Image: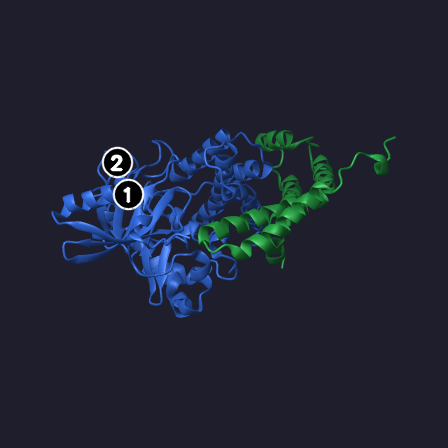
Chain colours: A green, B blue
Amino acid sequence: MSDERDAFEQHPSALDLIDAAREHLATRVLPTITDPRLRFETLVATHVLGVASRELSRGPEMAAEIDRGRAALPGSPEGDGALCALIEEGRYDDPEAGAALRRWLQARNELSLFAWNPLFLMRVKG
Amino acid sequence: MTDATRPDALPAPLRDELLAAVSAATGLPAALVSAKRLAGGASMETWSVDLRVGDRAEALVLRRDMGANMSAYALDRATEFALLQAACAAGVLAPRPRYLSSPGAERRWFLMDRLPGESVGRKVVRSPELAAAREALARQLGEALAVIHRVPIDRGLPPLPRPTEGRSPAEEALHQVREVLSSLQLRNPVWTYALRWLSARTPAWDGALSLVHGDFRIGNLLVDPGGLAGVLDWEFAHLGDRHEDLGWVTVRDWRFEQDARPVGGVGSLDDYLAGYSSAGGAPVDRDALVWWELLGNLRWAVTCHSQAQRHLGGADRSVELLSLGRKAAEMEWELIDRIDAIEKGAR
């Protein structure tokens, strides 16, 4: 059976574990830290757990969207390596192909930013 | 909890080394009054140090190498010390260098005067106490850069990195980005596209080399209620195209979210360039300025990945360094957005 309901799943999920660790750091550990350097590093640690959580929550969907968009570009590159080779060959130098490439690159960046810094995305997109 | 302001917060071997060097330089007895570690960059250890030298109190800042090297292009402490001496002599607003470690020191350091002011970027762009200072800051940044770019490069400066013969500063910068990318062994179509785009549009260069600070941005500048108080962190200084400095402070990340003020989150491009011109800066090529701003975004994105690699490779385990690899997405977004606007003719 390959039905999704029957796939092997850990319980609690990896996402549950990450969210719990992030919540613990944010609510139990951070308020007790007075050393400024350690506090900053712990804030960063809390943030990266949030990044991982957002990415895992939309991971498969995001990867599929990126792959579909890349395959639809002129030259139909199958991966980032193939796309880089086409860029270096000048395949996207003409205005139309360049514009299509930039649209895809920006969609790719937006998905990265959704995980890393959703507020940045809100700010720059207005 | 330890009291970081106690004299013994400074490691004893370093304290002894420092006091011996100061005594040797002055011929006076030197004693440590207090020392406090400052939040610093990832490649440099920085301390606020108070000494008594003879019967005089001295308020100083110590800059000391960390173990790991952040960049192959950074100056060593002895060169940075000599450069600061020359820059101060030429009237640049920078802390006066005072004492240099002996060549035999395991990790080189120097002490410089401690100037007043705030350098933390978020505070510089937001602090209510600095509101009046910010009004004039963009203009002062332009003025300060003009003074730096007018420092004579043929006398008084220590040997500084310069573009390889046959390459313009822009071509040298692109070469350096490619070298870092090659060492990272990562493929990212944003970098490939931006490199190709920038390579096809390198700015015209008249062959004139200037002293370039190399990291002139909010975060490396001291600001007090009176305005710009000092230009810090000279480790990336080199000889090159002055537009590199002019563009770097306009990179979005150095606005610390104050996006409406393109110059370091504090002011307008017009005020900044008016300050530059009024202090004797040569005419500015706006296209070159934009090119260096975009190059700055690319270089900062690639540097962020290099920093993440320091953690991943085990040289310097740090969640902060690791996280920078993901922060690069902000510069990558900016690069594509700006290039797209230029291509559409909406500069």
Q: Residue at x 46, y 53 (%)?
A: B254
| Earlier residue among tags 2 and 1 | 1
In the rendering, at what x and y percent does residue B36 appear? Answer: 34, 53
Tell me the SS state at disc 1: helix
Could you classify mark 2 by the number of other residues whose Cα lies within 10 Å: few (under 14), some (14-19), or many (20 or more)?
few
Q: Give the camera-side residue of A107 and B56.
A: B56
In the rendering, at what x and y percent does residue B245 appear? Answer: 38, 49
Chain of the residue that carries numbered disc 1 in the rendered image: B
2 and 1 marks in contact (CB < 8 Å): no
Q: Is residue B340 visible?
A: no
Q: Which residue is mark 2?
A: B105
Residue B159 drawn above or below residue A49: above
Q: Residue at x 40, y 51 (%)?
A: B39
Q: Give the camera-side residue of B290 and A6.
A: A6
Chain of the residue that carries numbered disc 2 in the rendered image: B
Q: Give the camera-side residue of B10 and B344.
A: B10
Tell me the SS state at disc 2: loop
For marks 2 and 1, give the CA distance: 14 Å
Amino acid type, label 2: Ala
Q: Quadrant of the N terminus of chain A?
A: top right
**Residue B226, picture quadrant:** bottom left
Amino acid type, label 1: Ala
In the rendering, at what x and y percent does residue A112 appear? Answer: 63, 45
Residue that extends furthest to the front in the rendered view of this protein: B1
Q: Give the camera-side residue of A117 and A123.
A: A117
